[in-house]
Image (cartoon, rainbow, N blue to C red):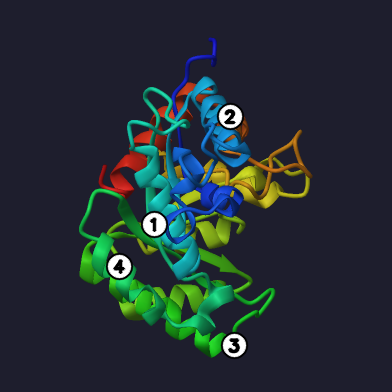
Amino acid sequence: MSDAVIEWFDSHCHLQDEFAEAGGTEGGAGTATGGTVDGADGPGPHASRLAGTIARAAEAGVTRMVCVGTTAETSRAAVDLVKAMRHPDSVAVAEGVELWATVGLHPHDAVDGVDSLDELVAAEAAGPVVVAIGECGLDYHYDHSPRATQRDAFAAQIELANRLDLALVIHTREAWDDTIDILAATGVPERTVVHCFTGGPEEARRCLGLGASLSFSGVVTFKNAAEVREAAALCPSDRLLVETDAPFLAPVPHRGTLNEPSRVPLVGFTIAQVRGVHAADVAEASTLNASAIFAL
């Protein structure tokens, strides 16, 4: 069957990171709307790049995306970008394409403190733009923030997601035991997703056992990611999401380039192959799951 018209949902991308340098309100809105930020004669290069990115996504069938925050600044930029994309004069609007945002503090930036998110969460969490808390969690590979600080920030954001009844988006790297323990102790939000899942079957079963869903990125296409593919094969169809993590982790055959949402079908095709199903089956299931996770 043809995969040309399959509809996909990129459950995790960072478009605001790539386009924030255009400026705008709190570092984001100008990237999509043109106006004074992009020049009196029309949209500037960053707005045009965003328009091209969104157009390529739409052409590839990627019609829904969640733009994920990692600090107070990037969370604000994500919110502003989503609002700008909903403006009727936005140069980047593509028919049928929808964006949402998250608010979160990445473990790399845990030293900033979860309080840095307070104003934004208070202003936006109850609205139609913000759909999750995160990405948050633990990263013991780089240890850019002390581990104890990471753990405190992670637990605080789990509590925030529970209190606001929002989804929780988790980042975990080389920290499976502590991630599982903190989730179990704090209370796993009903709608929780482990983003860019890089564990194997054992870690997948542990996360699934807590009620979390698993989101797979371009890593699943990498030659050395056999265990990730095994996890993708065993993940129940109603707990599986796909993402790009754009502009990071471009899938094969685009490794080494800036990633973008239009490439999420490559992730889905690989998952379909290891599961022995049609890509359309993966697209339908992952889109339904993402819509449920983010309460859309």
The disc, 3 or 2, on the residue closer to the chain's N-terminal end is 2
Q: Which amino acid does the dot numbered 4 rest on?
A: Val
Front position among marks 1 and 3 = 1
Q: Which of the image's four quarters has the C terminus?
A: top left
Residue 85: image quadrant is top left
What residue appears at the point 47 percent right and 22 percent down from the top-left corner? 280
- The answer to whether residue 201 is left or right of residue 131 is right
Q: Nearer the viewer, residue 154 or 81?
A: 81
Marks 1 and 2 sit apart, C-alpha to C-alpha, by 23 Å
The disc, 1 or 2, on the residue closer to the chain's N-terminal end is 2
Residue corresponding to mark 4: 121
- Residue 251: assigned label: none
The disc, 4 or 2, on the residue closer to the chain's N-terminal end is 2
Could you tell me how many numbered marks the image carries? 4
- Residue 52: assigned label: 2
CB-based contact (under 8 Å), mark 4 and mark 2 = no
- Look at the numbered disc 4 and give the secondary structure of its residue: helix
Residue 241: image quadrant is top left
Residue corresponding to mark 1: 102
Residue corresponding to mark 3: 146
- The answer to whether residue 140 is left or right of residue 105 is right
Residue 147's x, y, as percent?
Answer: 57, 86
Q: Which amino acid does the dot numbered 1 rest on?
A: Thr
- Look at the numbered disc 3 and give the secondary structure of its residue: loop
- Look at the numbered disc 2 and give the secondary structure of its residue: helix
Residue 90's x, y, as percent?
Answer: 41, 34
